[in-house]
Amino acid sequence: MRSIEHWIAGASAAGTGYATVYQPATGAPQAQVAIGSQPEIDQAVAAAARAFESWGDVSLSHRAKVLFRFRDLVERHEDELAKLVTAEHGKTVEDARGEVIRGREVVEFACGIPQLLKGAYSDQVSTGVDSYSLRAPLGVCAGITPFNFPVMVPMWMHPIAIACGNTFVLKPSERDPSASNLVAQLYADAGLPDGVLNVVHGGKEAVDALLDHPDVAAVSFVGSTPVARRVHQRAAASGKRVQALGGAKNHAVVLPDADLAEAARQITSAAYGSAGQRCMAISAVIAVGSAGDELVDLLRREASAIVVGPGDQVSSQMGPVVTDEARDRVITSVDGAQKAGATVVVDGRDLRVDGHDNGYFVGPCLLDRVTPDMAAYQQEIFGPVLVVLRAESLDEAIRIINANPYGNGTALFTSAGAAARRFVRTVTVGMVGVNVPLPVPMAYHSFGGWKASLFGDTHIHGQEGVAFYTRGKVVTTRWPGTTPTARPDFHFPTAT
């Protein structure tokens, strides 16, 4: 079987243990991936620390040139990356290609690093004294990333970290690891020095080794809320800078004045794309007032028409979930909601795909009359399940969202500007869409939620990403001959 090794100091590095990588559409083993632990993490961090000694002093223009070349290579290998993602994650090739493109946009943002790292200069802050500020790299940074976006989410991290002068150790998901190795090879082909980017595969043991390592200065994480909270606490306890993005329960509110047919199409795409395995997937709809019955009927039609099949088939609109455990979790959640009184409008629990009896397939599920006390609403199912709640007013809908512990993304469908403005200003969520169901910011804005969807002070990528991967330094200068010699002054310095 094909082996997927670590990538350390610019070369493939064998592991001492291995885990199986499965094909979600068939359930069959397709590769084995090296599983790292403390020795592999130590080796990767040491390589990154050595590389930082020189990479941190490389000129901004040279760093930008490497990133420009890397960006071109990512574009040239777009299909190859997308097919690797489909083979190991299960999402359709077109969906995977979109992920690669959105990741590449962060690389394009990072190519502007000379502008992004411009400091500030103040002349003559006091007599003969000037002052200026700059942003300095941190050193070795680490990224711990989830299975659902094996190309895009790591690219939210390492291009900016590397552009800022840091070196990087990536611990991707062991479920779909191949894309990370190809990305590392593309960096090498672009001229990135050995050791600047390292990839160590593994599970909890590798993660803990990174969180505790004294030579790791910062940790970026994307995953579930319980793990994000643990990562933040453990890494911060060892003195690291941390940004840990957690889970979500993203709501779409639909007002009666919205274009209901268009809202249903957009919400269906946002709910069931990538089999609902997106941190920005719409998983809860709040139908306001008279919009409810008609909207549910439109959602039923849209969900029932989705073509489910292997991700590498052109006809497929939705692929399998990533594991058999994920499929079972979806089925159990729908079972529980039905027992609790929800109406199963579209039932995908018994879906079978011809020729793929052992694949991890589950069809779109639509649940109506869900209430906030039901587990299907409270929990992040992370699968193709859309629940519909009812509310009498926009204010009631906002109260429901604000009471939810998650605050990642939300959307409002309406034709009323006043309602939209009220929603945007009062909802306690980090990313908001108006008639846009997946409000994923462009690379030059930052991505991140509120409440239990983010642990740490900064969002990811954009200007906040630059701030995260650098630290400020202020320099105050005075040169001999610019001011007359004076007797020692023991007062606290003030501008004169």
Image (cartoon, rainbow, N blue to C red):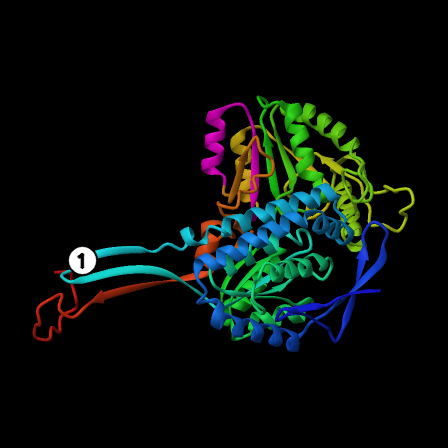
Q: Is residue 118 magenta?
A: no
Q: Residue at horizontal 85%, vertical 41%?
A: 351
Q: Nearer the viewer, residue 433 or 34?
A: 34
Q: Crowding at label 1, few (<14), some or many (≥20) Cα neighbours within 10 Å?
A: some
- Residue 84 image offset from top left, x and y in percent: 74, 53
Q: Is residue 458 visible?
A: no
Residue 426 falls inside the magenta stretch: yes
The magenta span reads 405-427
Residue 346 image-quadrant placement: top right
Find residue 95 and report its horizontal and vertical position in percent. 70, 42
Vertical position of residue 168 compared to residue 362: above or below: below
Estimate the x, y position of residue 226 in percent, counting from the top left: 61, 59
Disc 1 residue type (three-letter): Gln
Q: Name the residue that disc number 1 marks.
A: 124
Residue 367 seen: yes
| Residue 267 in the image: above or below residue 440 | above
Q: Is residue 168 left or right of residue 80?
A: left
> Is 213 rendered above or below residue 219?
below
Instruction: Name the secondary structure under disc 1.
Output: strand
As rendered, which of 39 and 197 lies closer to the eye? 197
From the image, which quarter does the C terminus lie in? bottom left
Q: Say which residue appears at 76% left-offset and 73% top-offset.
A: 17
* Residue 473, horizontal then vertical, whole percent: 34, 64
The residue shown at (48%, 35%) is: 424
In the image, taking residue 326 as reference, residue 351 lies left or right, namely right
- Quadrant in the rendering for residue 401: top right
Is 165 drawn above or below residue 390 in the view shown? below
Q: Quadrant of residue 305?
A: top right
**Which quarter shows the N terminus?**
bottom right
Number of callouts in the render? Answer: 1
